[in-house]
Structure formats: C-alpha cells, structure tokens
Amino acid sequence: MAATRHVLIAGAGIAGLTSALALARAGLRASIFEQSARLDEAGAGIQLSPNATRVLIALGLGERLQVTAVEPQAIRVMSGSSGREIVRIPLGRYAEKRYGAPFWVIHRADLQAVLADAARANPDITLSLATRIEDYATHRNGVSVLARRGGQLVEEQALALIGADGVWSSLRSKMHRRSDAVFRHRAAWRALVPAHEVAPQWREPLVHLWLGLDSHLVHYPVKGGALVNIVGVVDDEWREAGWSASGERDEVLRHFARWSWAEPARELIASTNRWHKWSLFDRPSSSGGSGPATLIGDAAHPSLPFLAQGGAMAIEDAAVLAAALAKDADHPAKALRGFERERRGRTARIQKLSRKQAKLYGMVGPEAWVRNRVMRWMGGEKLLTRYDWLYSWKPPMFELAYKNVVQLGGEDA
C-alpha cells in the first residue's frame, strides 16, 4: 500500500475504530493514536439502530457482534407514574424486514472489543496506545503530526488527519474550533445489574422506556441477556466532564421519588448500589476542519441521548468518510470538505430532534396526558414510521465500497 494512502486517526473509540476499518476496506491504510494506555471497558449499553448495524455488518462484523448483542423485539413505552404500558413499538424481525438491517442493543465494551480485534487483525491498520497528538501541520503533501508516546516525541506523515477523540476533543481546539460544549441541565445515571437479580419481566428482549416527572428511565438486556443496562436521565445542575463519576443508589431514588414514580421502576433502580453518572452536553455541529483534517463523531457533533443516535452517527461518519477519501484520495482536503457537507445537515437534524425529544419526554400534567393518548392512538407501527428517514439511511457508494459482503449478517466472501 502506498504511503500516500495513509490516514491518521486520533482516538480509538467507536468513531475511530470504525473509521479505520472502513478506510482499510476502501483501500487505504489507517493509523490510530489513542492517548489512553489501555482500551478499558467503558460505559454501559448502547442502542444500535439499523442505520448503524447496516455499516457494521457490511464491515464483516455481524457474526462476532451477534455473540453478545441482543435483538429487542419492541420498545415498550411505559408511564412512569402508573407503571402501565402506553404503547409498544415493534422491532425484531418486523424492523429488520422494514429497514434491511437489525436493531441491536449491546454493551459498549463488547462493541469496542470487536472493533479493536478486527483493527488489530487488519494488516492495513496500526493501533498505538498511550500516544497523544501534540500538534500537527498541513502542507501540500498532506499532514505532519507530532505525537508523544511515553517520554518520546514521534513524527508521522499522512494523507489526512481525523479527530475522533470525543466531546472533549483536544484535536478540536488545535483545529481552532473553539465553540464550548453546552450544558443541558441534565444528568444521566447508569448501572449494570445481573439479570437474575431483577424481576423476570425486565429480562425480556425489550427496550423499556419509562416517561415520568422531569425524568425518564431506559433499560434493556446486554451481554447476551446476562446483564440489564439501566439509564435514568434527570433534571440536574450537577456538571462535570467525563462519565465515570460514582453515585449512590439513594441519590438516584430521590430523583425517582415514590410519590411520582411507580414502585416497579423504583424496585429496579434499587436492585443495585453501583451507579455512575455523567452530565449531558452537546454543541452545534462543527463547521468542519481545514485542509486535510476533519472531526467526526462526538468531536464534531455531540448529541443528547434522547434519540439514542450518538454511536450510530459516529458509525455513519466512518462509512461516509471512507467513501469520500476512497473516491478522491489525491485531493484529501477536497474529499474532507465533501464529507463535511454530506454529514452536516443530517447530524444537525439529529441534534435538534434529540433536544426536542428531551422536552417531549419531560412533559408533565395535562401535556403528558395528551402525549400518552396520542401515542396510544397512533400505535406502535405508525410511531416507528416516523423514524423511517433515520433507520433507512445508507451511506454513499455503499455497494461499491463494501461490495464483498455477500449477505446480511454474513462475513466477507
């Protein structure tokens, strides 16, 4: 592989690893610089809607992901106050037939492990841990990067530089994209509970979404059904970067008070004392990079979790980025500006709708009563059609860039 077809990626999260795999599939080499010394088990569950699983399957990862992924049969929307079901939105085979790809839920660590193993096994991908980019410079031949690895400075040249280092991206500031992340006055609490420690109804392959007073609760099985992932989002003025702050069960339960929340939801919350919390931030979509450098995933367009599309947008970015660079590798700056234009409208729409969904989830009193009645009247199938534009997405050049995939869910030919 010619050295000129080499792309450098900052960050070995979902965005960075998927980008490297997509670039290698498209005929380029990729080097990933990750500042952490190890790829720790990060976060908890993640929802992978068909627009994301379509790309992962096309990269030949379907069978490996299915080992621990769970395919929920429906989203069961619940009233937080009464504990009664409002509506059930079909997923499972119904969604797979409708969109041509499955809807999965999976532990983030399992997804990252599959991506990292595939990257390490690919001769066109290099993964360097404990390596932090200190600075970079663009020039007519691409980009030169200065990085620190341990106590040594290393220099690397590449066709392009991709910032995939998350919402608190250090590379973003080096690109002079200085718009601060916006605190949205909410905090999310997360926990993982062994499935045998919760009521049988919560072990079923369903995504449960509870809508309550100034808060909502989501839970679903992961790790092949061995664990239940729980996330509660509440109004909160606590703000802190990162998402690993420890929290106490009693503090979570205060947000889901007995007078406003049904006892089954509170019992689920009380099933574990091991909680973590993180503050919710987003920011306007990035105006893009400059020269042969750009940002992807949360570094470019972080969104609130109310559409469960943060990971999916990073995976989509990876596919579009690889297609753009494969099409015009001799003009990387032009290719990256095209990539940014392709993504800007869709990611901005996701961000806007995520904020709107937050208001919908947080309705109280008569507004909440009307919301619930409308959802029941529409029914699950009709509610799902509102996401057709989102879940039916296919990346440009999909058939060309990933032509070796023989069938849905299969590995490479």
Image: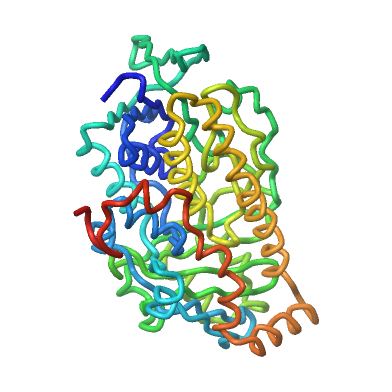
394 or 284, nearer to the observer:
394
Residue 172 percent location from the top left of the image: 58, 28
* Depicted 252 relative to depicted 332: above or below: below
Residue 222 percent location from the top left of the image: 35, 65
* Depicted 80 relative to depicted 4: above or below: below
Q: Quadrant of the C terminus?
A: bottom left
97 or 207, nearer to the observer:
97
State which quadrant residue 286 falls in. Answer: top right
What's the residue at 76%, 83% (across, down)?
370
- Name the residue at the right extreme: 366
What's the residue at 43%, 46% (across, down)?
319
State which quadrant residue 216 falls in. Answer: bottom right
189 or 138, nearer to the observer:
138
Q: Quadrant of the N terminus?
A: top left
Q: Is 160 on the left-hand or right-hand side of 260?
A: left
267 or 34, nearer to the observer:
34
What's the residue at 46%, 25% (across, down)?
161
Residue 294 percent location from the top left of the image: 54, 30
